[in-house]
Image (cartoon, helix red, strand yellow):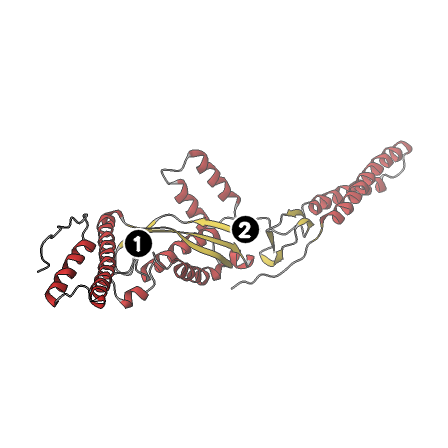
């Protein structure tokens, strides 16, 4: 496993002053050599010194060109991995105008994983011609040694998976991540962006399979169980923990992971909707009956306590029945007024 090493690059402005001074010296040496060569040729003297001056200026100019190629810039949230002839030297995180060894590699080169990914992307029927050309051009350049360490957002596609109960559901997630260790991201995996996308989908499928979509039945055990629909925070925490473990080998840290879409698959959506409606009706009926029973008990007790109306057990039962019908009925009650004796 690779590990990131900090490397500090020199200030580009100081080196720029050195380069400008060197360029002036090279021009002066070349011009002086040419002038001296013309003068010595006219006088018939030896031209050895002018030739040496011109050759030296040419050699210094080549060295100057190599020296100039060491300049680079880093924006906030960027890092550059420095590789010298295949040997990892360190990672520069100092932003601004910088200068480093000009022989440091500027790209990682192409690999088989990148080529396979490009071939798959170009082969998709929905990919436009311009997008195909852009994708192929980016692959030809290879993986850059500049790595963005900013937070990125991965919007996952809607997946069809089976929950813990075996019900087919549709689920999608969003993952906020950033590169924490640039060495692991570039050296331990072929393509860390593709690795993140693949592991995000795998982790989502695994988390969806260990939790049920909703409570299966109205029991104390099932009501306390964690479900995808009712326990969003717990499921998000589990998904983040799963992704953290899976992405650690690539040097990627997960800032947040959330579900963005959750629904039953279309083939069972209607059946599950009817079940939820039935559960809602049963719960409402239960609440109505509990309230009606309480009101009937209160009415019978109040009538018995004041003693103005004496009811036997049969009349109490009839009154309770009538009140339950009135209170629990869906339609408006139409009472019949009895103008005769109570009995």
The vertical placement of 326 against 133, above or below, is below
Residue at the extreme right of the image, as rendered: 43
Q: Residue at position x 86%, y 34% from top?
A: 35
| Residue designated by label 1 | 161
| Residue 191 visible somewhere in the drawing | no
Mark 1 surroundings within 10 Å by alpha-carbon count, few (fewer than 14), some (14 through 19), many (20 or more): some
What is the tally of numbered marks visible in this picture? 2
Q: Is residue 71 left or right of residue 282?
A: right
Q: Are marks 2 and 1 in contact (CB under 8 Å)?
A: no
Q: Secondary structure at mark 1?
A: strand
Q: Which quadrant of the view contains residue 20?
A: top right
Where in the figure is residue 86, as x and y percent of width and height? 58, 56
Question: Can residue 177 be spotted in the picture?
Answer: yes
Mark 2, Cα crowd under 10 Å, few <14 / some 14-19 / many 20+, is: some
Q: Secondary structure at mark 2?
A: loop
Residue 261 % position (x, y): 36, 49
Q: Nearer the viewer, residue 35 or 192?
A: 192
Q: Which residue is mark 2?
A: 108
As measured in the structure, the alpha-carbon distance from the residue carrying label 2 to the one carrying label 1 is: 37 Å
Name which quarter of the figure residue 16 lies in: top right
- Looking at the image, tell me whether mark 2 or mark 1 is earlier in sequence order: 2
């Amino acid at each position: 496993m690779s590990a990131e090493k900090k490397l500090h690059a020199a200030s580009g402005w100081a080196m720029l002053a050195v380069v400008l001074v060197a360029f002036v010296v090279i021009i002066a040496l070349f011009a002086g050599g040419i002038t001296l060569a013309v003068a010595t040729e006219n006088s018939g003297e030896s031209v050895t010194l002018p030739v040496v001056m011109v050759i030296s200026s040419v050699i210094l100019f080549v060295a100057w060109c190599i020296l100039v190629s060491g300049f680079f810039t880093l924006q906030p949230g960027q890092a550059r991995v420095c590789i010298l002839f295949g040997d990892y030297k360190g990672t520069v995180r100092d932003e601004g105008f910088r200068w480093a060894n000009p022989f440091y590699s500027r790209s990682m080169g192409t690999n088989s994983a990148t080529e396979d990914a490009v071939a798959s992307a170009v082969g998709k029927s929905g990919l436009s011609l311009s997008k195909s050309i852009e994708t192929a051009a980016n692959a030809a350049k290879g993986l850059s040694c500049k790595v963005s360490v900013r937070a990125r957002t991965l919007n996952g596609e809607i997946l069809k998976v089976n929950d813990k109960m075996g019900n087919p559901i549709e689920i999608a997630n969003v993952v906020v991540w950033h590169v924490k260790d640039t060495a692991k991201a570039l050296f331990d995996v072929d393509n860390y962006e593709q690795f993140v996308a693949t592991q995000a989908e795998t982790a989502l499928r695994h988390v969806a399979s260990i939790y049920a979509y909703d409570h299966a039945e109205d029991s104390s055990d099932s009501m306390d169980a964690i479900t995808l629909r009712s326990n969003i925070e717990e499921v998000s925490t589990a998904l983040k923990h799963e992704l953290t473990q899976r992405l650690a080998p690539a040097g990627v840290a997960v800032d947040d992971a959330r579900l963005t879409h959750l629904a039953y698959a279309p083939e069972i959506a209607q059946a599950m909707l009817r079940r939820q409606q039935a559960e809602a009706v049963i719960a409402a009926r239960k609440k109505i009956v509990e309230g009606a029973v309480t009101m009937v008990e209160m009415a019978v007790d109040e009538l018995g306590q004041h003693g103005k109306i004496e009811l036997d057990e049969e009349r109490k039962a009839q009154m309770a029945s009538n009140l339950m019908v009135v209170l629990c009925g869906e339609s408006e009650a139409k009472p019949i007024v009895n103008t005769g004796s109570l009995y």
